[in-house]
Image (spheres, helix red, strand yellow):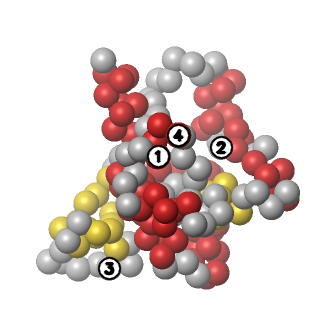
Amino acid sequence: PEAADEWYRYAKLRNHDPRLTRLGRVLRRWSFDELPQILNVLKGEMSLVGPRPYLPQERDRIGMDLFTILSSRPGMTGFWQVSGRNQLTLEDRVQLEAWYVRNWTVWFDCIILAKTVRTVLFPQNGSETSSFVVLDGKTDPTRHAASAKVRSHSA
């Protein structure tokens, strides 16, 4: 039941996934399991930065942001990975990825790529922690307001 709750909330097993071997845990810890996606980038099927692909069963839970997110090419890394990654719920991920698609710039992709390197090399140095502002139910990662409701996710 605990694993089922975690799967529903985060759309993945964050801790102690029984399907992983020791080698699998090392590969996932250092994100080496993502490297084959470079072939998809070279073939033009993916971008380096963009929303992560969703499983079919996850798409039913996305709501109105589904079309916004799907309008962009999926990426190997994205805004949610550098904004809390495994600490974020599926709903948080959807909000961040929809915001990314609506506010995309080349400069923002450069920042995400730099933060991705930091996240992979130093995952316990705060890269797994994110604070973003939620205003009227909408995530605005660029806003820092003392009066706003701030949601903080810590590792």
Identify residue for label 1: 59
Give the amino acid at mark 4.
Answer: Pro
Please name whichever residue, 117 or 2, is drawn nearer the observer in this view of the structure.
2
Marks 1/4 in contact by CB < 8 Å: the verdict is: yes
Task: Give the residue at mark 3.
Answer: 143
Nearer to me, 46 or 15: 46
- Element at badge 2? loop
Q: Which mark is residue 56?
A: 4
The residue shown at (63%, 19%) is 21
Secondary-structure class at tag 3: loop
In the figure, residue 77 lies in which quadrant?
bottom right
Q: Nearer the viewer, residue 89 or 124?
A: 89
- Quarter of the rendering occupied by the C terminus: top left
Q: Amino acid at mark 2?
A: Ser
101 shown above or below 26 = below
- Of the pair 141 and 50, the residue shown nearer to us: 50
Residue 126: % across, % down = 44, 56
